[in-house]
């Protein structure tokens, strides 16, 4: 089922929602011997676990975690090599990230609703297929999926993704970017890449991302982890037949939230996904890019809440 939503200028509610940063408590959980940073946002009920995308972190969910708290107790992970979680050589592949997510979910002792963006959506799909007992539902926000035939990301994104696939050159380019740009400039560049109208993201939300980027810039191995994980993700979604087999085995009820103006994952690719799984709910948001939870937080929370209510009623 595909539903399309229009959303032009942000509403006053969306602006206000974005300025109300959800407070959280930081802690570290040790999963498979690796320290994993977790932001606990509170709430009560069954677990809701937020999973960021490539280059993201727990802070990507700070505008919507309060609203999601109506669905359960909310936590957000920093996958190994991202945010405040250290990287190791054995934690950079999609399968390694899935195992890390699996370890965290099993520590919760009941199945979770996974709310996942971009690469996090790919990892969450793998987890739902491999360990269905740990997942009670999926919300995929611009998940990294195989592209639709004949449809490519725009030229800047295509060049960036192509660079990640070249050993040696990719890490040099990422290191050069860190030398050329401050952490604040990198954070703002990333938001601009992901959103066609990043200026509507409230200043305090942007500042929170900058603060994480500054702290992360001191982490050893961050560039290496980014490149290795990007390469693994791109290789994974390039194998469309294998990916489709994973999608076919997912039993958890699933909501797909996609921005029509997403430069990284074109909405045509999500239409392909919907054709594979017509039982999944797909919501296309107009005037939204790759990070709906940051661009239109109130609309995002309303969309997820409406879907969850319908599932509960069913």
Image (tube, rainbow, N blue to C red):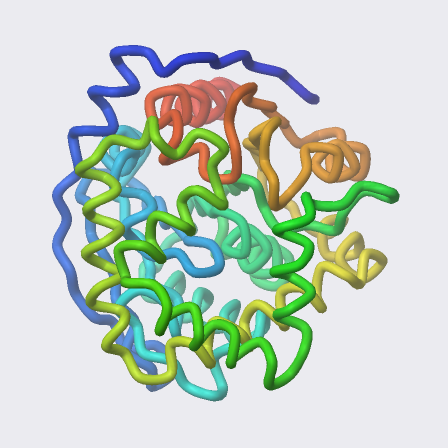
Left or right, 151 with reference to 181: right
Q: Nearer the viewer, residue 183 or 250?
A: 183
Please report the residue visible at 69 percent of the width from the left and 65 percent of the height from the top.
Answer: 162
Q: Quadrant of residue 253?
A: top right
Residue furthest to the front in view is 180
Locate residue 273 relative to residue 114 in the image: left or right. right
Q: Count of labels shown?
A: 0
Observer-nearest of 149 and 213: 213
Above or below, comparing residue 18 to residue 10 in the picture: below
Residue appearing at x 52%, y 21% in the figure: 287
Pinpoint residue 76: horizontal percent, then vertical percent. Answer: 31, 53
Residue at coordinates 51% horizontally, 41% vertically from top-left?
137
Identify which residue, 242 or 20, lies in the foreground. 20
Q: What residue do we see at 26% from left, 50% from top? A: 209
Return the x and y of residue 30 as percentages of the image width and height: 28, 77
Q: Is residue 128 left or right of residue 293?
A: right
Residue 131 image-quadrant placement: bottom right
On screen, 81 above or below 109? below
Q: Quadrant of the N terminus?
A: top right
Q: Could you tell me which quadrant the C terminus lies in?
A: top right
Instruction: Give residue 64's position: percent from left, percent from top.
Output: 30, 34
Where 189 sits versus 169, above or below? above
Q: Position of residue 12 (x, y in %)?
A: 26, 11
In the image, 156 versus 254, the foreground residue is 156
Say which quarter of the image contains residue 308: top left
């Amino acid at each position: 089922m595909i539903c399309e939503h229009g959303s032009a200028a942000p509403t006053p509610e969306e602006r206000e929602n974005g300025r109300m940063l959800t407070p959280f408590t930081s802690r570290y959980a040790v999963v498979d011997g690796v320290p994993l940073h977790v932001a606990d946002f509170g709430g009560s009920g069954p677990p809701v676990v937020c999973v960021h995308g490539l280059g993201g972190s727990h802070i990507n969910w700070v505008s919507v975690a309060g609203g999601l708290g109506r669905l359960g107790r909310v936590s957000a992970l920093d996958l190994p090599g991202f945010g405040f979680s250290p990287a190791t050589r054995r934690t950079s592949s999609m399968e390694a990230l899935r195992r890390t997510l699996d370890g965290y979910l099993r520590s919760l002792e009941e199945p979770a609703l996974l709310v996942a963006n971009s690469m996090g959506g790919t990892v969450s799909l793998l987890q739902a297929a491999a360990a269905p007992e740990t997942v009670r539902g999926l919300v995929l926000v611009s998940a990294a999926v195989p592209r639709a035939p004949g449809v490519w990301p725009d030229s800047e994104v295509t060049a960036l993704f192509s660079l990640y696939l070249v050993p040696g050159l990719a890490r040099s380019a990422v290191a050069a970017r860190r030398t050329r740009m401050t952490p604040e400039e990198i954070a703002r560049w990333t938001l601009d890449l992901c959103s066609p109208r990043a200026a509507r993201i409230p200043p305090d939300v942007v500042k929170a991302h900058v603060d994480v980027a500054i702290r992360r810039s001191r982490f050893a191995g961050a560039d290496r982890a980014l490149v290795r994980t990007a390469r693994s993700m791109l290789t994974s979604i390039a194998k469309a037949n294998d990916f489709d087999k994973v999608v076919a085995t997912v039993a958890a009820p699933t909501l797909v939230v996609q921005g029509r103006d997403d430069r990284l994952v074109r909405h045509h690719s999500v239409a392909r996904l919907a054709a594979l799984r017509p039982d999944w709910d797909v919501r296309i948001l107009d005037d939204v890019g790759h990070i709906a939870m940051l661009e239109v937080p109130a609309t995002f929370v309303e969309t997820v809440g409406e879907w969850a209510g319908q599932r509960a009623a069913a």
